[in-house]
Amino acid sequence: MKFTETNLNGVIIIEPTVFGDHRGWFMETYSDSKFKEAGTNLNFVQDNQSFSAAKGTLRGLHYQLNPKAQTKLVRCTKGAIYDVAVDIRKGSPTYGQWFGIELSAENKKQLLVPKGFAHAFMTLTDDVEVQYKVDELYSPENDRGIIWNDPEIGIEWPMDITPILSEKDEKAPLLKNAENNFSFGE
């Protein structure tokens, strides 16, 4: 497994080692000991899976407030997505900055999105399946969002379209107006 830091401290690209032969392939998608060796100490409590039927579907930007904030380990198991993390920790030198990467069933890359970051993805193909591990259970009362096209964040989405959104995501606030109890260094 290869771990690569991004421009956002704590947001990490994980590239599993794939073993293949005439039968197909095998890979570890998560190894507690390898993640600890890489400096992450996580205790995942739930695995989630989503399906998006149409290319151009956008889910996010989502996060949960403290004390129910979540770290997510995201991977795409069918199709392809553009996966994004946004630093929303007040006082962070990278506050409001974002990182994006293509995750696909083909490239098998994963993205670790820590607490204090909002997360979103846009589907690049039809019939997309995304799986992610979280270290905190879903908490509806702590669930929050930021509008996907906030001009101050300026995410460069790979498709210049009006995405397919949930009603909740359509009505999400700008980062400057979003409820947020994250502080850098906590």
Image (tube, grey):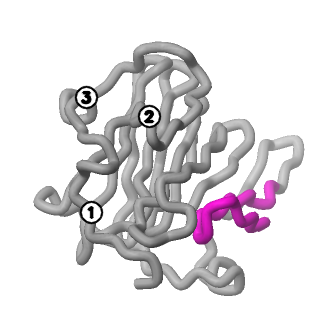
Nearest the viewer among 76 and 82 is 82
Q: Going 59% across and 63% down the picture, which residue do you hit?
A: 11
Name the residue carrying label 1: 180
- Type of the residue with mark 3: Glu
Q: Nearer the viewer, mark 2 or mark 3?
A: 2
In this rendering, which labeled residue sits more in front, label 3 or label 1?
A: 1
Quadrant of the rendered image containing residue 77? top right
Spot the residue most to the top: 161
Question: Could you give the CA–CA distance between mark 2 and mark 1, rounded to whole angstroms?
Answer: 18 Å
Neighbor class of circle 1 (other Cα within 10 Å; few <14, some 14-19, many 20+) is some
Spatial CA distance of label 3 from label 1 is: 19 Å
Q: Which residue is mark 2?
A: 151
Q: Quick one: label 2 or label 1, which is nearer the N terminus?
A: 2
Q: Which circle marks residue 100 in the picture? A: none
Q: Is residue 142 left or right of residue 132?
A: left
Please tell me in which quadrant of the rendered image residue 58 appears. Answer: top left
Q: Name the amino acid, label 1.
A: Asn
Let me know if residue 44 appears in the view. yes
Q: Is residue 168 left or right of residue 47?
A: left
| 147 with respect to 140 (left or right) | right
Of pointers 3 and 1, the one earlier in the residue sequence: 3
Q: Looking at the figure, which quarter contains the N terminus?
A: bottom right
Residue 133 visible (yes or no):
no
Which residue has dot 3 on it?
170
Q: Is residue 141 magenta?
A: no
The quarter of the image holding the C terminus is bottom left
- Tell me the magenta residue range: 1-18
How far is the residue under mark 2 from the one under mark 3?
15 Å
Secondary structure of the residue carrying tag 1 is loop
Q: Determine the residue located farthest toward the right in the rendered image.
A: 21
- Is residue 2 highlighted in magenta? yes
